[in-house]
Image (cartoon, coloured by chain):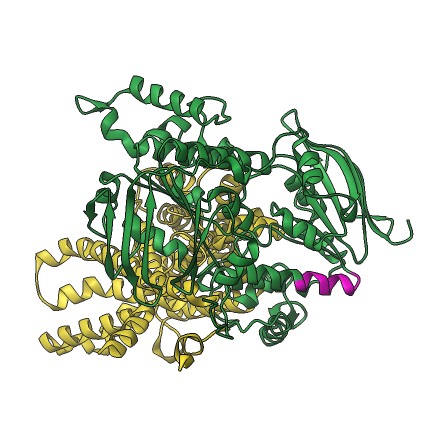
Chain colours: A yellow, B green
Amino acid sequence: MNALADIAIKLLRQREVGLVLLILLVTAIVSLVDPGFLDDRNLKDILVRSAPTVIVACGVMLVVVTAEIDISVGSLMALLAALMGLMISHNEWQLSMWIGIPTVLLCGTLIGLLTGALVTLGNVPSIIVTLGLLTAIRGATTLLMGGENIDGLPDELQTLSKVGPAGMPLGVWTAVAVLIVTQIIITHTPLGRRLFALGSSDYSARMTGLSATRLKLFAFAYTGFLTALATVVDVPRLPKIESGIGSGFELLVVTCVVVGGVSIAGGRGRLGGVVLSVILLTMVRPVLTFLDVGEAGEKWTKAIQGLFILIAVITDTVVSRSRRGGARNTSSRGTQVAVPRDATGGPAA
Amino acid sequence: MADSLIQVDRLFKSYGGVHALENVTLDLRAGEVHALCGENGAGKSTLIKILSGVIAPDSGEVRIDGRPLPAGKVHATEDAGVVAMHQESTVFPDLDAVDNLFVGRELRRWGGLLLDRSAMRKQTSDLLAQLGEDIDPTRPVGELPIAQRQMVAMARALSRDCRLLIMDEPTASLSGRETEFLLQLVRKFCEQGVAVLYVSHRLEEVFQIADRVTVLRDGRLVETRDISSINTDDLIRMMVGREGAELVGRQARTGSFGGDVLRVNNLRRDGVFEDVSFTVRAGEVVGLAGLVGAGRSEVARALFGIGPCDGGTITVAGQELPTGSVAKAMACGLALVPEDRQHEGLVLPMSVGANLSLAVLRSLTRNGFVSNRLEQELAEHQIAALSVRTAGTAAAAETLSGGNQQKLVVGKWLASRPRVLILDEPTRGVDVGAKAQLHRLIRRLADEGMATLMISSELPEILSVSDRILVIREGRISGELDGVNATPEQVLALALPDEREVAVPS
């Protein structure tokens, strides 16, 4: 019995296992109610909706790993969407989207860099910096759009959102590419290891000669770039650009990162958990639709997503408590490994 | 000098007008262990930080083989062969041993783009094997016991091509046997021609291992001496710069005790300690000795209700104490000054006054509000009674030196007027002067009738302060000694795990 419980705890300690189980459970229940949930179109739709969140979460995860946070990505997305719309709309500046897209990517990266600079060089806590930017950038967007929606987006952009290899739109493939690149950064580059090291102990990092400034600048700039990329992926799906676009997105992303098992204290987390939690949280709305709870569905989405944060944090605490208990046991007896208990107690005879 | 490897030449460093280092010059020779001594605040840490490239001096330079070391650059300094093992906390707890060893100077492939994980893993295993450690290199280091964490830090230093190894309090959290092992390793490096700069508050270690010793005081160089030309008293005098700062003499004890205040019967925590029974009388200091990991702290924590306990009884002044409740332990008159004062003893950013009143807030309230006047009175009284050196009651606890922080923790618990005071490593990381003051304080409290249980890894401390000594080995009390007549050898013999099962002389 004990052994079984041990295995269960060990498995549940892997956040990914819990998330997969939860996704399967939810899918099973919903498809019993309405088999249409398993329809290709619906599953594809969930992936398409997940794509921008996955892309941005890759950046925010690296920020959180360094023990900082970025809650400005929703507004940044709106600003970049407005900028892109203005540049390429028939009714506005009528530039080619091949100018618009790189410009948006560049701007996103620069704003991310600026955020990082305020945090590191300005020595302001990132929660304050990005809280300020959240409001300021939203305001800048309203000014830029002059209170009007932007429509007249070129058709070629719309098609870009629909076509793609293996029946998957380009957005999903972009997300896959970002995942691969981010995973390589995390596990196979010095940069990734140093980001985790910095988040694990900034004192040790200083004593080791790691540059906290450079590492954090990278994490924020990468987040800015990925936010721009997510904008480019997401805008073509929209008939027109409204100023409210992306509001609440920053919290969804942070939710996904936390639910995905990334330690808010820095130093710990895996990409797999983040991706799974994005999918899980993106499923909430379609699941409610299929369960046919009607009007109530819309209203419940946020509440349920919020509930996941609480569940994630509580399991985190429970699991780490059991782990710490285990570690203390080993440390209290660890120094005596040279003398097995049997050797001292046993051979008295 | 022909064999001089490192020259430290007229270093100056000040922080906001205060001189941390003033005109410090010394040389380090290849193959020597050079001890660096001084009270807290003497400038040791600043010197180490400059040597290891964490900070740059205001003026002066450090040369290796006559070539100046780059100032304030950790990587370049390490490349030149100067590697520092800072105090125990310089590991990355969430990273595994491999990453801990190599972060900052990773082995790479693919033109430097990607990590060479397998090569790093192999080197890590080799280095740990060299140190005689069997550590899973893929386990987060934070989950390892402290001694093994220390070995990871050591392996990290070794993985650099090291010519000067700086060790800052490497044994602060190690048991006697682990310390012995570490010192052997240090000797081995020296035989290979490495210079070791060794910082420790444990003077017996300094005498055991050092060839020469340099003493700093108030940021200035006092003297560099051959260790063979001085004794402990000389060294302490050089450090404190005044006479009479010796440790409390063993004869300072009155030897008259009251009745049993604390009675512990068959206390047991499965797999950690068992069959622990002892008493502490009023006015008595009972020293609890043993190796780190023998279960000393766990016993103390179980007594105070923080740590788990699976059986046994605790009686305080005739009243049985239910286990597992700090509130009830406090109500019965128990107080625990924990081992980790920075995390468990104090709230560092809070003021000295607020820290002192924390355990007795309820008694300081009037009409449900904390009375500032009562709090202030308490704080001023405790600061005076314990001679805490602080800028005032409003200063943050973190601005105090280690010794004064420790006095603060003691003061916080004395405010609750305990009957039994449990001290877990009361002078760890505290400078010699403050240590002597704390020892005198413990004795004074005992003379006033306090029943004290003191855990310590430092034999001189146990021997000079305790009236009675209990030794724990592997979770069991292995013996009891009279504090006045016990010898270090006796304590150690009871503390060390004994494979031979010596026949006990009757």
Left of B404 or right of it: where is B85?
right
- Looking at this view, is A198 or A243 the one in front? A198
Q: Is residue A86 left or right of residue B231?
A: left
The image quadrant that residue B14 belongs to is top right
Q: Read off the magenta span.
A: B184-193
Percent coordinates x, y for residue A339 in the rendering:
48, 73
Q: Quadrant of residue B49?
A: top right
Q: Residue furthest top?
A: B373
Residue at 25 percent across and 57 percent down: it is: A314
Image spot of residue A197 (x, y percent)? 52, 57
User: With respect to residue A107, does A155 lie above or below?
Assistant: below
* Magenta stretch contains residue B187: yes
**Quarter holding residue A45:** bottom left
Residue drawn at x 53%, y 38% as measured from the top left: B251
Q: Position of residue B159 (x, y in %)?
A: 67, 65
Secondary structure predominantly adopted by residues drawn in magenta: helix
Up the image or down, B66 lies above or below B310; here it is above
- In this picture, is A289 found above or below B250? below
> Which residue is at a point 53% across and 40% down the rendered structure image?
B250
| Residue A54 part of the magenta segment | no
Number of labels in the image equals 0
The quarter of the picture where the C terminus of chain B appears is: bottom left
